[in-house]
């Protein structure tokens, strides 16, 4: 079956770095997505990886290892506004997104 | 990035009434749109995939006669919750598939909160 695993909740300190891991199993693979969702709002697109390696975008970076079925989202210089849920989603061979349950990130001052 | 709008953002209705939610892609054409539902503190649940000019594909357990989907144009999909009941109260979010070169992703609308009394 198809499955996405990510931690339910993480806590980090303002100004620090946090890494949110995601493992996936899908029928075929057409890329790995990360979305940010603040409470009460719809998700917003953060990043997309389809090749192995690290993609950096400002304070956020995303990494993919296709052979391991593994990705992580790295957030640097954490700010209070980064408190949100982070959703990992893998696109299968039918171009459908398979969603993880999300990781709630709590930032403490 | 691509912009997707949803209307209305909030709906409060009486049990037994029908509610229509619109999803529009504002600056791109979307041959495929998706409808999700999210209950408090739970993950997104895909309800159906809406393809322009054809019937929607519903996920297992989603009643197609209760959740009517119409994708009449490349920029508009509608979800109608027929005979809504309190258990249908949820956050309904649409997304539109956008393709730019090799990147294919989904952009989400802001969501519609439905409260059925």
Image (cartoon, coloured by chain):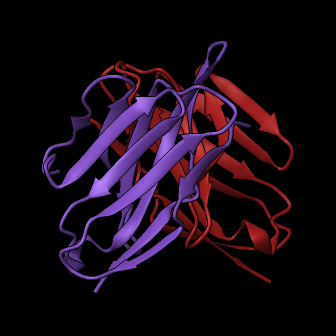
What residue sits 46% from the left and 60% below the top? A7
State the image quarter where residue B27 is shown: top right
The furthest residue to the top: B101
In the rendered image, the vertical position of residue B37 relative to residue B17, given as above or below: above
The furthest residue to the bottom: B117
Left or right: residue A80 compared with residue B24: right
Left or right: residue B41 compared with residue B85: right
In the rendered image, the vertical position of residue A93 relative to residue A74, given as above or below: above
What residue sits 35% from the left and 34% below the top? B50
Left or right: residue B16 compared with residue A74: left
In this orientation, does residue B115 appear?
yes
Task: Residue B110 in the image: state x and y as whole percent.
Answer: 58, 58
What residue sits 47% from the left and 21% below the top? A67
What residue sits 27% from the left and 82% below the top? B14
In this orientation, does residue B45 appear?
no
> Looking at the image, how many numbered discs can be counted on the residues?
0
Task: Residue B77 in the image: state x and y as whole percent.
Answer: 43, 40
In the rendered image, the vertical position of residue B35 relative to residue A106, given as above or below: above
| Residue B40 vs residue A105, the one in the foreground | B40
Q: Colour of chain A?
A: red
Task: Residue B83 in the image: state x and y as whole percent.
Answer: 18, 67
Task: Residue B52 in the image: state x and y as whole percent.
Answer: 39, 25
Dividing the image into 4 quarters, which one contains the C terminus of chain B?
Answer: bottom left
Left or right: residue A56 compared with residue A102: right
Dividing the image into 4 quarters, which one contains the N terminus of chain B?
Answer: top right
| Residue B102 vs residue B78, the one in the foreground | B78
| Residue A45 vs residue A13, the one in the foreground | A45
In the figure, the purple chain has which letter? B
């Amino acid at each position: 079956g198809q499955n996405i695993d990510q931690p339910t909740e993480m806590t980090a300190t303002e100004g620090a770095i946090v890494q949110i891991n995601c493992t996936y199993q899908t029928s075929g693979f057409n890329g790995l997505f990360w979305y940010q969702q603040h409470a009460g709002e719809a998700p917003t697109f953060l990043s997309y990886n389809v090749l192995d390696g690290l993609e950096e975008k400002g304070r956020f970076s995303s990494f993919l290892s296709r052979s391991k079925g593994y990705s992580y989202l790295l957030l640097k210089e954490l700010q209070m506004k980064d408190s949100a849920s982070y959703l990992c989603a893998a696109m299968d061979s039918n171009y459908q997104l398979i969603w993880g349950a999300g990781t709630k990130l709590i930032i403490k001052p | 990035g691509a912009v997707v709008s949803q209307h209305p953002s909030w709906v409060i209705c009486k049990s037994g009434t029908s509610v229509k939610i619109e999803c529009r892609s504002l600056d791109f054409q979307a041959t495929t749109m998706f409808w999700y539902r999210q209950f408090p503190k739970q993950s997104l649940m895909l309800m159906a995939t809406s393809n322009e000019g054809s019937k929607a594909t519903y996920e297992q357990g989603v009643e197609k006669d209760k959740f009517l989907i119409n994708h009449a144009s490349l920029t508009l999909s509608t979800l109608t919750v027929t005979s809504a009941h309190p258990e249908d109260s949820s956050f309904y979010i649409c997304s539109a598939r956008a393709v730019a070169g090799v990147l294919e992703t989904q952009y989400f609308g802001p969501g519609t909160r439905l409260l059925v009394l």
